[in-house]
Amino acid sequence: MHEERKRILKLVENGVISAEEAIVLLEKLGTTTEQKAPMADSTKEKETFQGEFTKEESKKEEEDPFLDDLKKDFNYFSTKVMDFVGDALNKVTGTNFSTMGKEGAVEWTIPLEGTFNSISVDMPNGQLTVRDSADERAYLEVTSTPILQIGSMKDLTEEEIREQFNYAVDGETLRIHHAAKMIKSEVIAYIPKGEYKKIRANLFNGSFTMHNVDVEQVRVETKNGSIKLADIKFDSIEVESVNGSIDIRDLTGRELEAETVNGRVYVDGKIQSLEGQSVNGHVVLTTRDHTAKLLKGQTVAGSIEVYIPKDLSLDGEVSSAFGKMDVKLSDVEFLQESNQMFSKTTRFRKSLDHSSALSIKGETKTGSVIVRYTL
């Protein structure tokens, strides 16, 4: 069994199988070993491999050096695999163009004529900021820089660089389309205060920032870059990054979903329905809404922290393969506390009169889950 375990861990280390697949294989390996054990084995040894352990048996398992080594190995290899994923994403998504020099950069301001209540942006290479305008004017501040002076990009004039940047107020929508892959543009869109219908941004290599805006719907996607939102009133928000952190603060709204592959997810606001997900990174979710309905966090390599108001009815379930369940809510009823070999689960509940019911779900593979009341 020891050699089989080493082979499975080696597959994880080489990236052939995932940590979740390895867990399944190890569980099957434990079951097979139990079935092949000689009939002369003691009852005590057989009970160690039963599906659900008693508290006394769980304690003995924790003292078993083999199990301790197994958990340490998996924590190490899971972290190593996820670090590899992060490094690979950083390489695949390309050079960090923001570190290149400003030589050849062209800066200009574009006043926007007409009125609009929506924004739509497509940029393969560049950063976008949307924020309120101090003087109630609508305008763009653009900085465009050729990345490589080769081919058709060689010896571009200032006018030619500007011509690569396309924008228009089409009906009630401000459209920004910058298709030149060899030119990086940093765009700040200043918009008057007001209520906007939709803001959509599709970026490839660049970050997105937005603050001090009231908008019904936000949809942001970037392959390589962070996403930051602050001081926003909204109805629904959906943000997604492949390689980059997500930081959202001081928001008020109905529904928010934040997802990244490699990076931390941090959300804090008055939000009724909140979901945060990462593959390689911690997930920290806080809702301060006293009518909140859902709070869900999920990650593979990282911990989950959940912070909620105290005056809500609760229905929660949190789980981890190797971490611990740290639910410090003094007034809840614990319905289930399972501590199996590769699965720890805690279910809890609280009922209050005249209070909304908040559903809490937290799932991680290698980290812990923390649940607390907000201060």
Image (cartoon, grey):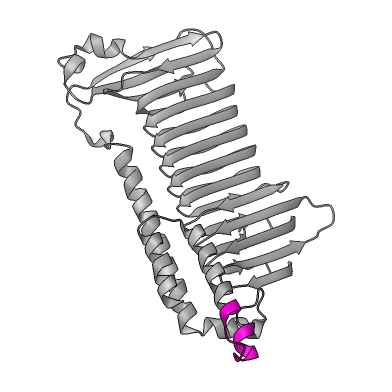
Number of callouts:
0
Residue 245 at x, y percent in the picture: 43, 45
Residue 243 at x, y percent in the picture: 40, 42
- Furthest toward the right, the residue is 353
Location of the C terminus (image quadrant): bottom right
Q: Residue at x 62, y 50 (%)?
A: 296
Left or right? Give the position of 5 relative to 329.
left
Q: Residue at x 25, y 14 (%)?
A: 161
Query: Where 131 falls versus 116 (above or below)?
Result: below
Tell me which corner region of the image, top left, top right, bottom left or bottom right, holds residue 198.
top right
Q: Residue at x 60, y 81 (%)?
A: 58
76 vs 315, nearest the viewer? 76
Report if residue 362 lies within the magenta region.
no
Residue 332 at x, y percent in the picture: 73, 66
Left or right? Give the position of 145 relative to 251.
left
Residue 82 visible here: yes
372 vs 180, nearest the viewer? 180
Tell me which corner region of the image, top left, top right, bottom left or bottom right, holds residue 33.
bottom right
Residue 326 at x, y percent in the picture: 59, 68
Query: Where 268 falls versus 97 (above or below)?
Result: below
* Residue extent of the magenta highlight: 34-47
Residue 195 visible here: no
Query: Where 317 falls versus 43 (above or below)?
Result: above
Report if residue 44 lies within the magenta region.
yes
